[in-house]
Structures are given as C-alpha cells and as structure tokens.
Amino acid sequence: MNTTHTETDVIAERRGAVGFLTLNRPRAMNALSLGMVRQLTSGLTAWREDPDVLAVVIRGAGKDDAFGNFCAGGDIRFFHTAALSGDPALDDFFTEEYRLNHLIATYPKPYIALMDGVVMGGGMGISQGASLRVVTERTRMAMPETGIGLFPDVGGSYFLSRCPGRVGEYLGLTGLTLGPEEALAWGLADGQLGTSELPVIWETLAHTPFESGAAVESWVQSRCAHATQRKPDRAEIDAVFGLSTVQDMVRSLEASSGAWATETLTLLRKRSPLMLHVVLEQIRRGREMGLADALRMERVMVHQCFHLRPGAASETVEGIRALAIDKDHRPRWYPSRLEDVQASEVKAFFQNPWGDTAHHPLAHLG
C-alpha cells in the first residue's frame, strides 16, 4: 500500500518500497526553513523504523517541473530577521538542522540525493551525508558562506576537510561554485545522471519490486556515469592553500600573474576577512574530527556568529544585509583588512558558550 503525507514545503511519500522526499519551495530555490527541517526529520525518523521502506530518495522541485534546484541553503532572510529581533527560533534552526545532517549521514538505509541545479550551504548538509550523491549537468555546487560573514557549516568541517589535498581550504575560503566534473573529482559526488533521466529514475523506483535497500541503491548507481572527463589540476591549489595563514595565501596569489591566481584572489577579496581566518582554522580542526564532533564545533561557531557581536554588529547579519536585504553588495566587514584580524578574535569563535560539554545543544549527538 502506498501512503502520502504532504506539507506545504516538503512532500513525503512512500511509493512501493521507497520513501520519496521532495523539497517543494521552488520560488525560494528550496531554501530550508525550520519547518522544512522538522518535516524532513519527521519523515526520515518514521521511515527508519518502517520495514516496508527499503531506501529514501530526495529531490528539489522546480517552478514548472518536477525537478529543479535541489536546495540553495538555509533561509538567510529568516536568519537576518531573527538575529535582529532576538528570536529563539534562530538557535532552534541550527540545532535541529545539524541533528538532521547527522541523521542523514548515519541513516541505516540507503539515502539517495538527486542534486540537480543549485546545491549550496544547507543543501550540501542534506546531501553530503547521502550514501549515493548524484549530480547532473546542471549541478552548481558551493559552500559560499564566507561571502555573507558566515562559515561552511552543516558538516562542512568534516566533508570539505576530506576533499583531496587542500581542496577543502580552497572551497571553504573562496566559496567557489563547482560543476559536476569538479564535484566528482573532489569527492563531493558519486555519480552523474542527465537531468532528462531523473523523472524516469524517480518513477521506476516507485514501481520496481526491489528486494532490499542495497538493490535500490545499486540500481540507481548502475545508471550513473562515474568517471570524470577531466581531473582538475590540484598543484596550484595545494601549493597556495597548504600555506600556514590566509595572509601567506594572499601574498602567494599576489606574486603570481596567472589567470587562476587572479581569479582566486578576486574571490578572496570579496569575502569577510575575519571569517577567512576563522574558516581556515575550522577546516584544519575538522580534519582531525569525526562528524558528530565537527557538528558540535560548528554549533559553537554559529552561536558566536550571532552573539559575539549581537544584532546589526554581527558580521553575519551585515553580510546577509548586503547580499539579500539591501542588496547593495557592499558589506562593511570588520575588520576590513586581513592584516587587522587578531588571533583572539578567531579563537573566540571556538569557545563553548555552554560551559561543560553536557549542556551543549548537540551533547548527545552520535
């Protein structure tokens, strides 16, 4: 028997032996709200215990089509409003989102993410923990948080730091947008399908009498292309982003006249100087952590993003203002120069505001 449960922004259906999740907020590029996080958590928790559900597959709906942008991240307009008003739902959002990220990464059944279109920020959080991560020719993937005075959260400490060489530092600091080839080459995707193939895959999953979750995943995987046409050259990335400090990286890029160095330097100069320092520390700490500890660290960091300098003084609130509220694209970063960022300012982002570990909101994670 097939069952359907529909909410406004998330559609959860069981069809045959598979649980289907559709992010259904296409006009907002399926950006995650607190309600959506809760709906996803509820559906996954119920299906985890349901023996009739062998696997789960997730997609993002388009404005006019069944498939569109997977997920552009968290609802940053909500972050801005909640931070200025002192709304406690802001803390709830990050606590519950990170729990959802961990639930997905530790899910006992295959969880297949069809990452068509834009996959950024929170969209990476609900896809990088998947047992099968599928991109398309339309995939545009990024962790662009340094551009809004934030850091690559939702487990970015963990999955970026597991990229080859120093690619994690490169992606985390620059917020570079990747296509499917780079995503596959750098370990952020497992296979590729054409966008036109997705509706057939979706419907076939609903009507095929699979014997096990492994069979569901294997069938999708067998239809994917796994080899990349081109391996992106990592030599420059590793040489620059393996340096000890952000200042060293910038000096190295300034000394080069190559196109890659020029483009990379341009990206870094648009980012928050403070958060560039913070993110470099984050990625390098994350390399030595398991996922649960990485998410606990990020929960500390995101608290500090909104509370070290509360309200409009927050680097994150200012970054969101410039991008999404006033849209002047002229954030007033403080400090405004990389050289003026103090080590004590960076260290403060990693100081647990809850005192002992037992009171941390994610104390029991994992």
Image: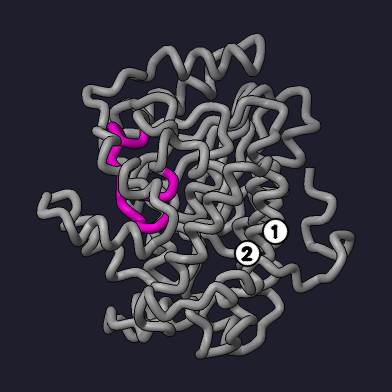
Residue occupying the point 58% across, 12% down:
215
**Few, some or many residues within 10 Å of mark 2 (<14, 14–19, 20+):** some
Looking at the image, which is closer to me, 130 or 186? Answer: 186
Residue 156 percent location from the top left of the image? 53, 50
Type of amino acid under label 1: Glu
Type of amino acid under label 2: Leu
Please name the residue that numbered disc 1 is placed on: 96
Q: In this orientation, does residue 39 appear?
A: yes
Discs 1, 2 touching: Cβ within 8 Å: yes
In the figure, is residue 71 to the left or right of 208? left
Q: Residue furthest top?
A: 211
- Give the quadrant of the C terminus: top right
User: Residue 29, which numbered label?
Assistant: none
Looking at the image, which is closer to me, 353 or 261? Answer: 261
Asked if the stretch drawn in magenta spans residue 89, the answer is no
Asked if the stretch drawn in magenta spans residue 175, the answer is yes
Q: In the image, which residues are magenta?
A: 168-183
Residue occupying the point 42% across, 47% down:
70
Please name the residue that numbered disc 2 is placed on: 34
**Few, some or many residues within 10 Å of mark 1 (<14, 14–19, 20+):** some
State whether residue 292 is above or below residue 250. Answer: above
Q: Which mark is first along the chain, 2 or 1?
A: 2
Q: At numbered mark 1, what does the secondary structure look like: helix, strand or loop? A: helix
Q: In this orientation, does residue 321 appear?
A: no
| Chief secondary structure of the magenta portion | helix
Residue 63 percent location from the top left of the image? 34, 54
